[in-house]
Image (tube, grey):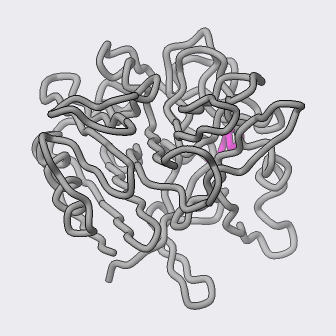
Amino acid sequence: MGYIADTATTMDEIKTAIEAESVANGWTLEDGILFKSGCYFQLASRNSASSYLAVYGGTGKSGSTLLDQAPQGAAIVSNSGGTFTFPINYEIHSFDDTDEIYCIINYDTSFCQILAFGHSDLDNIGGTGAWITGTIPANKAVSSQFSGFVLFSVTQHSLGTNSYLNNVGTPLFTGRDPSFNQSSFIHSGLDSTGWSQESGSGVGNLLGISYCASLLTSLPNLSNQSSPLLPIKAIKRRNSSGLTVIANLSHARYIRNDNVDLFEVITIGSEKWKCYPLFRKDSSLRNGTSTTPGVTHSGTFGYAIRYQGP
């Protein structure tokens, strides 16, 4: 386990830091590909006016090529609302009890984006359990299309972008987007479907946040204005309308951050959690919007990562 916080002048520096932190937690880096426990990930970066850092998942490697890649990668990218210029701040949370790596960048004071990957420790899911997630779909990072953040209503059981807009993806398994805006994927062989993604109601696709939508809507607690942490799950649609949990992230949780400051560390029992906005906090429009393209906030939707820092 580990935690580092630093500044970077290029995306390459962040890429190198993630790789080094992964190796320190037992991953092997070979031919530019990280692998451990049957999970394979490859980071790619670009340093230019529209810098990005992307992660791609696979089930094996041939030299420097991933085999059986996920349909899309996940990324963090600079050409968003609140465009950043280097240097930027970044934090990396790494865990090896359940293999999970989280990288969060912070720029223009209050904007955040996340890139993460890991391994589901749930048994009998039929695949490697490799998962990736990020703020932006990798195809939009490459084509420089990201223009802002748009939210579905949480009552529609999904956060993320409307299908007709070039905006944010579906970070941390929040979405149910039927277009090409998915940015969370996990490998599970149940029903012979392989990589699962958030794209509607078909067998093999992911459910989105419907399992905790009513709780997210109800927070913060009216009695004491607190916001309990909610589990982050990847839930796969099965034949005969069944559902199976194929990942339960060990070190990340959803939170409504109405009463939580940017980067605040909260203590729950013996554990500490560091809180981040999903993109940028805006209490004045706390549920976001599903109609305005290019908005530069995510209401009060956020997440917390188990904290091991000072």
Left or right placement of residue 142 versus residue 173 in this view:
left
Res. 290 in view = yes
Over which residues does the magenta segment extend? 283-287
The C terminus sits in image quarter: bottom left
Left or right placement of residue 140 versus residue 19 in this view:
right
Residue situated in front as seen by the camera: 61 or 248: 61
Res. 257 in view = no
**Residue 41's x, y, as percent?**
31, 42
Look at 82% across and 31% down and name the residue there. Answer: 239
Residue situated in front as seen by the camera: 309 or 176: 176
Look at 86% across and 67% down and name the residue there. Answer: 222
Image quadrant assignment for residue 224: bottom right
Vertical relation: 274 (above or below) 262: below
Residue situated in front as seen by the camera: 184 or 292: 184
Image quadrant assignment for residue 137: top left
> Chief secondary structure of the magenta span?
helix
Q: Is residue 258 magenta?
A: no
Image quadrant assignment for residue 145: top left
**Residue 77's x, y, as percent?**
31, 31
